[in-house]
Image (cartoon, helix red, strand yellow):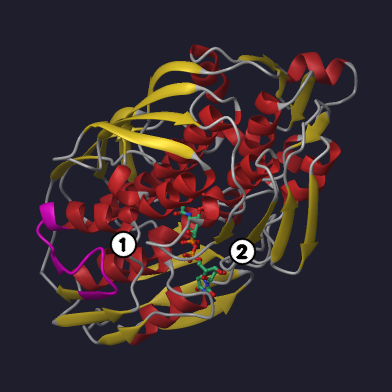
Amino acid sequence: MDSFRIHGGRRLAGRIQIEGSKNATLPLMAAALCTDGDLVLKNVPCLSDISNMARLLRELGVEIDGDSGTMLMKVVDHNLVHCRYDIVKTMRASICVLGPMLARRRRAVIAMPGGCAFGSRPIDLHLRGMQALGAKIDFNGGDIIVTAPDGLKGTTIFLGGPFGSTVLGTANVMCAAALAKGRTIIESAACEPEVVDLANLLNKMGARIQGAGGPRLVIDGVESLGSATHTVIPDRIVAGTYAVAAAVTNGDVILEEFPYDGMLAVIDRFNEIGVHVELLEGADDPMHATVRVTSERLLKPTHITTQPHPGFPTDLQAQFMTLLCIAEGNSIITEKIYPERFMHVAELSRMGAQIYRQGPTCVVAGGTQLRGAPVMASDLRASASLVLAGLAAEGETNVSRIYHLDRGYTKMEEQLNILGARIERISESATSKDGAGTTANEALSAAES
Ligand code: EPU
């Protein structure tokens, strides 16, 4: 497995552009299953999760041209309905083919996704949504079999769960309802910008979806959906990660294609801490802004609670924990979406961080000078937090199992090096020579998207 060698303590400066959103792209790609027409997606990031989704869709009869940048998709076989465990276990987001397949093919057989590095990840709300639309659910041999031989019928569905709304659950029900008979109302829908992006695409394809971005969606089913061309929104988690990179190095960084409007809770926390996110361009198009990130010399502690959008995103919790390690004073972080998502805590502690965890809450005792150490990435965002810690640390940090990072950041080391970081990617062959490599099976066992 590749690893990063990071020479810490360098101040970042310069300008980079934020890539297209992984979590928007995955359900947008799945929407290709809803139509016989052409789907063209632009601004698709170059990530292993995207190639995995492409592999899955090919197995489901979709012809795909291009793997990043511009991607052209068209269904050539509507009879294939099996989403195999081999793929689902590499990427939990595979579940987002459920709604599109059921809507168009009236049958979906999907290997039940297991847990992931940060806890159990149920799909009960997805299934409840499909059942409410009239589907029948069976289980066999580790597969979920969802059928609707007579088609789907609109209804009113409450999609809230113990941890709030569900992003991919909302995407699934929205796709299914778009082709159901009559009107569907989804109450407690996810409000994430990625859900809005999907609604925008489906509406371009001829769907009738109102209310995206709010908790109540009204969907009037249509007979069929057609072709569309769509540009993926920029990635708010990548944007937040690079903004933290600027802050932990006391840098001065300009980020283009910064989805400012989707990041207000994050910007609010940055303000509290003493990190300035100054809007340079984009007041009229705030999902595609240009910002300058600078910070005060002494950063202040704060409290962060992760919540569904528009609250503070769980996908930036680990990165902010690194930032708060170097703020002066005690900060409190509470994880309300995935109470076990703290794999980074033990690794940050290896670098000198002082973090005390009790259940879903961590107290971060700031003011620490982090020191380089060998650390191990355990999931996508935890990996990002370790790279950020490596940038802030004195000395050299080695982050192993970087394949986690490649799922969600396009060549992160190159982006950070453009800004003046010194990060080398040590390739798999080099590490396996000294026996430090990881087997492909270990790599495949860690789906978390
Ligand atoms: N939940 C249920 N039942 C369900 C579905 C979800 O109880 O049927 C719970 C989950 O266990 C969790 C909460 O509801 O506690 C929210 O989960 P959600 O369904 O919203 O997560 P998701 O749609 O599977 C997406 C992102 C995740 C991100 C979460 C939360 C994609 C591909 N993945 O997952 O992204 O953490 O929303 O915002 O969009 C990442 O990019 O690193 C990542 C993990």
Q: Which residue is mark 1?
A: 100
In the figure, 384 relative to 207: above or below? above
Q: Is residue 400 magenta?
A: no
Q: Is residue 73 left or right of residue 223?
A: right
Measure the alpha-carbon separation of dots 2 and 1.
31 Å
Q: Secondary structure at mark 2?
A: loop
Q: Residue at x 79, y 42 (%)?
A: 353
Q: Residues within 10 Å of mark 2 (few under 14, many from 20)?
A: many
Going from N to C along the chain, the mark reached first, 2 or 1, is: 1
Q: Which residue is mark 2?
A: 335
Of residues 235 and 209, the one nearer the viewer is 235
In the figure, 323 relative to 339: above or below? above
Q: Is residue 248 left or right of residue 215?
A: right
Q: Amino acid at mark 2?
A: Glu
Residues shaded magenta: 203-217
Q: Is residue 250 left or right of residue 283?
A: right
- Residue 52 on image: x %, y %: 50, 41
Q: Residue at x 59, y 54 (%)?
A: 302
- Residue 268 on image: x %, y %: 42, 51
In the figure, 348 relative to 128: above or below? above
